[in-house]
Image (cartoon, helix red, strand yellow):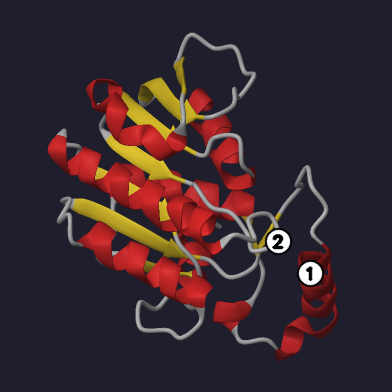
């Protein structure tokens, strides 16, 4: 029986992953580190409501067999670049360092298509730097997922995302496979499969996420 940690369990993909883990008999305990409650009552869930920017202060509780990092924000939601970097770079890298310190052998994190530490685009660069520094922790089973546009039932309305979804649905036949929309459900399923079965590659592209999680 295994213990899982989820960072970002109240987000779109994280919330779907949580429900999958609750149904999976392989996992007997699910530790949630978040600033807000999942509002799900289950004997399997152990919630830690914390300041996520101070994650390193909770090292004693940060023990598990696998860490699922579903943390992420958007330009519209977090326009301040310093705060954005604290979320999309700082939290995953801190979590990876803590996982290494606590001998957690499986670390699975959601990045993004186009992530590149050498990019001149701030958002792509941030994701790329996160990937680089997570991999530097040399955790035995590290998997970095690079999904394209993630779709699903969100609480908030994202105008830019809605426009992109309309375009993809209308002209999807013109879009290469790696750029096609991907459901949060597919990503969550792929993360669970990676935790249980592993993979030969550490960087999991959007096309491969489709293959694993379909």
Q: Quadrant of the C terminus?
A: bottom right
Vertical comparison of 3 with 80: above or below? above
User: How far across and how far down the image is residue 150, in percent?
Assistant: 64, 61
Instruction: Name the foreground residue: 185 vs 119.
Output: 119
For discs 2 and 1, the disc positioned in front in the rendered view: 2
Q: Which residue is mark 1?
A: 160
**Which residue sits at x=34%, y=68%?**
129
Question: The N terminus is located in which quarter?
Answer: top left
Q: Position of residue 100 (x, y in %)?
A: 17, 43
Q: Specify which label sits upstream in the sequence, 2 or 1.
A: 2
x, y percentage for residue 49?
A: 49, 22
Q: CA distance from mark 2 to mark 1?
A: 9 Å
Q: Identify the element where label 2 is drawn.
A: loop
Residue 51, compared with residue 28, is above or below; it is: below
Q: Is residue 133 left or right of residue 157?
A: left
Q: Position of residue 31 (x, y in %)?
A: 40, 24
Residue shown at 53% from the left, 52% from the top = 72
Q: Quadrant of residue 41?
A: top right
Residue 213 in view, yes or no: no
- Identify the residue at image location x=79%, y=69%: 160
Question: Answer yes or no: do the residues labelled 2 and 1 have beta carbons within 8 Å?
Answer: yes
Residue 121 seen in this snapshot: yes
Query: Which quarter of the figure has residue 135?
Result: bottom left
How crowded pointer 2 is (Cα within 10 Å; few <14, some 14-19, many 20+) is rated as few
Q: Residue furthest bottom?
A: 174
Identify the secondary structure beneath mark 1.
helix
Apparent side of residue 120 relative to residue 56 in the rendered image (left or right): right
Please state the total of marks drawn on the protein image. Answer: 2
Identify the residue at horizontal 64%, vertical 75% (top origin).
180
Characterize the local packing of mark 1: few (<14), some (14-19) or many (20 or more) Cα atoms within 10 angstroms: few
Which residue is label 2 attached to? 76
Residue farthest along the top direction in this orientation: 43
């Amino acid at each position: 029986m295994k213990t899982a940690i989820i960072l970002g369990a109240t987000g779109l993909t994280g919330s779907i992953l949580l429900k999958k883990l609750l149904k999976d008999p392989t996992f007997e305990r699910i530790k949630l580190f978040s600033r807000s409650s999942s509002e799900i009552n289950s004997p399997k869930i152990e919630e830690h409501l914390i300041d996520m920017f101070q994650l390193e202060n909770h090292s004693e509780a940060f023990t598990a067999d696998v860490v699922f990092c579903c943390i992420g924000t958007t330009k519209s939601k977090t326009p301040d670049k310093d705060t954005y970097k604290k979320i999309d770079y700082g939290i995953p890298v801190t979590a990876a360092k803590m996982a290494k310190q606590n001998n957690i052998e499986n670390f699975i994190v959601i990045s993004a298509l186009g992530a590149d530490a050498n990019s001149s685009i701030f958002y792509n660069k941030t994701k790329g730097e996160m990937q680089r520094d997570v991999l530097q922790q040399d955790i035995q089973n590290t998997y970095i997922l690079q999904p394209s546009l993630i779709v699903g039932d969100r609480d908030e309305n994202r105008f830019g995302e809605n426009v992109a979804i309309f375009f993809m649905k209308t002209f999807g036949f013109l879009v290469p496979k790696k750029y096609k929309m991907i459901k949060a459900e597919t990503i969550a399923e792929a993360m669970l499969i990676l935790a249980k079965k592993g993979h030969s590659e550490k960087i999991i592209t959007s096309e491969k996420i489709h293959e694993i999680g379909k």
